[in-house]
Image: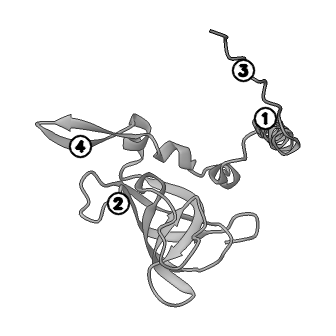
Amino acid sequence: MKKARKKARRITVQEWFYLGCLVLGGTLGVIAVSIMASRPPPEHPSKLLEAPGVVPWYTLTKVSFMQRDGKSALQFADRINELDGKPVKLRGYITPLQLGSDQKHFILSPKPPSCAFCIPAGPDEMVEVFSKTPVKYSLEPVTVSGTFAVLRSDPGGMFYRMADAAPVSSEGRL
């Protein structure tokens, strides 16, 4: 019996073209990933809101869930608990909760609202504000001061509230 010789198959021009495109695409992908990885991370918007005497937003994010008596409960960092019932200043963006340019009830967060029906952040980055003095709605950040409250079991899902708030002039702006 003669052994059947296998004929070597030649790669066509079209197959070489496809192989070259795959190699080129993979190389460009590696280059793009390395360029993106070498860039510094973008500045978190809350860093841009820091000012003297203002509570930084990252302080309010130190919240965790724990099990207590078989139920989930919020556990706030000591720094947050120290703010409870005290007068504080916060700087952030207004998400209106009522009509008009003068706001007495609104959400303050480190992120500007992206649409009229969207919540701008998670509960650890939102403070429900009840203002005694109307605060003019603006697309720019505002600084407000008031009595801070830590909400341990709010039915609306809020973690923080500020009462008797008033706008604070900051660098000539409200």
Q: Quadrant of residue 24?
A: top right
- The residue to which callout 3 is attached is 6
Q: Is residue 100 above or below residue 113?
A: below
Q: Residue at x 72, y 17 (%)?
A: 5
Q: Disc 4 versus disc 1: distance between alpha carbons?
A: 45 Å
Q: Quadrant of residue 92?
A: bottom right
Q: Residue at x 41, y 43 (%)?
A: 80
Q: Disc 4 versus disc 3: distance between alpha carbons?
A: 72 Å
Sequence-wise first label, 4 or 1? 1
Q: Which structural element holds mark 3? A: loop
Is label 2 or label 1 in front?
1
Give amino acid for label 3: Lys
Give amino acid for label 4: Ala
- Residue 73, label in figure: 4
| Crowd rating for badge 2 (residues with CA inside 10 Å; few <14, some 14–19, many 20+) | some
Is label 2 or label 3 in front?
3
Q: Are marks 2 and 4 in contact (CB under 8 Å)?
A: no
Q: Disc 2 versus disc 4: distance between alpha carbons?
A: 13 Å
Judged from this view, the residue extending furthest toward the front is 1
Q: Residue at x 79, y 34 (%)?
A: 34
Give amino acid for label 2: Met
- The residue to which callout 2 is attached is 158
Sequence-wise first label, 1 or 3? 3
Sequence-wise first label, 2 or 1? 1
Q: Quadrant of residue 149?
A: bottom left
- Pick whichever, 174 or 113, lies toward us: 113
Q: Disc 1 versus disc 3: distance between alpha carbons?
A: 38 Å
| Quarter of the image where the C terminus is located | bottom right
Sequence-wise first label, 4 or 3? 3
Sequence-wise first label, 2 or 4? 4
Q: Is residue 168 above or below residue 52?
A: below
